[in-house]
Amino acid sequence: MPWKEESELIERDKAARIIQKAWKCFLNVAVFQHYKRLIDIRRQGEPHQIVKYIDPKEAELLDAAAGVHVRFRLGGVKFPPDIYYKIFTHRHIEDLCANSPRDYTKLPAKYTSHIKSDDLQEEDHSGWYRRVENNGWRPVSDTFWVSTENVEVGEEKEIEFHFSKLKRRQDMEKKRKIRKIEWMRKMYIANWKEIATSNSSDNFKSYTLEQPWTNRYDYADISEEKMGTPEDNLDGNIYKKTNSTRLTPDSTYGI
């Protein structure tokens, strides 16, 4: 029996090792695919904007006429790998200093030596131009790969893009009119709020209430004959006196 239990433990340990190894391989492949997708996304962008995020000072030297493109690759001595980039150009570059590498800042010799010798004198090349390739594979900083999804969602809005240019222009005019109407509505409401909170509303209110008392008009002085003239009756009928009591300011307020 003990040997059976020991064999079962060995089989379980072997199975656990296989599962752990498969899980680690899956994680490594997932990490590699993630980095690969990052490289593919960044490769599709404009080179000037990409270099601007990586090295802003170097991006100032690039323009559309340079014909540059940026390439990325994975590298390093550990996993997960590091991301390296390199700037290439598909335009012709002429190194003028390589054609004339002599140091022209040094003064020439005052006198020329006429002593002849069998030994050839080597020319001093100190201070001459030597081309050094500084455009190697450089690592990308971690800040360049920070996700910008939150920034894009907050700043950009989804806009329906119609294939017809005329339709897009009509939609733009419609949106412009709607914004103008909303702006005028806000101005109208703000103007009425200002009138309601100012003293002008009190003056207007006192004027409307005191006006009937200051300019009272006695309607009893008007004769019934004048009120019953055909000129005041647009339909041409003769005014007929009704039995209802006519209300006047005097009768209303008991004056």
Image (cartoon, rainbow, N blue to C red):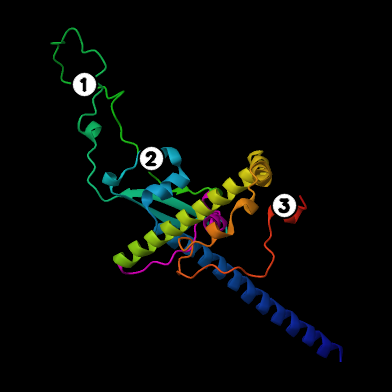
Q: Is residue 157 left or right of residue 108?
A: right
Write the start and end of the magenta stretch as one range. 144-164
Q: Residues within 10 Å of mark 3 (few under 14, many from 20)?
A: few
Does residue 76 show up?
A: no
Q: Nearer the viewer, residue 164 or 117?
A: 164
Residue located beneath label 1 in the image: 121
Residue located beneath label 3 in the image: 250
Report x, y in % for residue 159. Answer: 44, 64
Q: Residue at x 46, y 63 (%)?
A: 230
Residue located beneath label 2 in the image: 134
Does residue 62 show up?
A: yes
Q: Amino acid at mark 3?
A: Asp
Report x, y in % for residue 146. Answer: 55, 54
Q: Residue furthest bottom?
A: 1
Real-space CA distance between mark 2 and mark 3, rounded to the nearest whole angstrom: 106 Å
Q: Residues within 10 Å of mark 2 (few under 14, many from 20)?
A: few
Q: Residue furthest top?
A: 110
